[in-house]
Amino acid sequence: GAGVSQSPSNKVTEKGKDVELRCDPISGHTALYWYRQSLGQGLEFLIYFQGNSAPDKSGLPSDRFSAERTGGSVSTLTIQRTQQEDSAVYLCASGGGRIQAGGYTFGSGTRLTVV
Amino acid sequence: RKEVEQDPGPFNVPEGATVAFNCTYSNSASQSFFWYRQDCRKEPKLLMSVYSSGNEDGRFTAQLNRASQYISLLIRDSKLSDSATYLCVAQMYSSASKIIFGSGTRLSIRP
């Protein structure tokens, strides 16, 4: 597709369950970011993938969070044993290269609600 | 100290006014800069890149001051539709080249 695609758009899950969030970046984009945003708050960096380099996981809040990017394309963010404080919008962004003069494109996000 | 800092606002200005916000960055190695706009409950969207010589796009002007390590966004003749949160972004030229977002400045234009 022409843009960054995220699925599901909404997810309601029970506390303690695992969830998987998917991001399909723009074809050919080598850089991929995951952020989360709580209501009324700024973007919280989670993880960054750049080509074949080891990902920058410095933003992952706990070991319950993990992400992978298969074949340099689709990325999955997994949250294990979800907690209520994990409720937020999870945003994915992709860019065309290490230095992206044209900025990064965001998907419309996955709104996660943990009940 | 945050790597990219913005005044959270809110800035509340009348339609037609000129409004400006600044964003400071702490890492002098930062080389690329952008302004993004985020509407309520929407994803951020690129508004404009910021070039060393300054650049203009219609009513919007972006400037970079490397000596003082800040970028600015000026909006002239503001419209109701300009109401949004404006995020500034810095990126370093390094092996990581990670982009860093500010927390955003809220702008509200009143009729």
Image (spheres, rainbow, N blue to C red):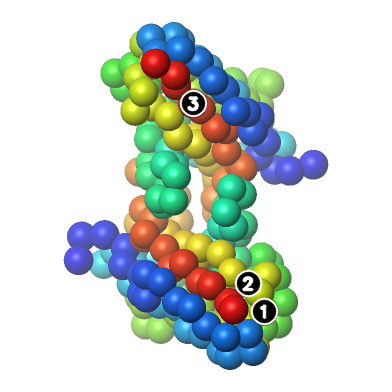
Q: Is residue B81 left or right of residue A50?
A: left
User: Which residue shows up at 66% across the image and 21% down it?
Assistant: B67
Q: Residue A2 shows which numbered tag?
A: none
User: Which residue shows up at 26% across the image and 67% down it?
Assistant: A27
- Tag 3 and tag 2 share a subunit: no
Q: Secondary structure at mark 3?
A: strand
In this view of the protein, can residue A72 be seen by the observer? Answer: no
Q: Which residue is mark 3?
A: B108
Q: Read off the chain for label 2.
A: A
User: Which residue shows up at 58% across the image and 77% down it?
Assistant: A114
The foreground one among B109 and B105 is B109
- Tag 1 and tag 3 share a subunit: no
Q: Is residue A36 left or right of residue A91?
A: right
Q: Which residue is mark 1?
A: A83
Q: Which residue is mark 2?
A: A86
- Tag 2 and tag 1 share a subunit: yes
Q: Is residue B18 left or right of residue A85?
A: left
Q: Is residue A74 left or right of residue A89?
A: left
Q: What's the amino acid at mark 3?
A: Ser
Query: Answer yes or no: do the residues labelled 2 and 1 have beta carbons within 8 Å?
Result: yes
Seen as rendered, the residue at the extreme left is A1
| Label 1, label 3: how far apart the Cα atoms are | 34 Å
Query: Answer yes or no: do the residues labelled 3 and 2 have beta carbons within 8 Å?
Result: no
Circle 1 crowding by C-alpha within 10 Å: few under 14, some 14–19, many from 20: some
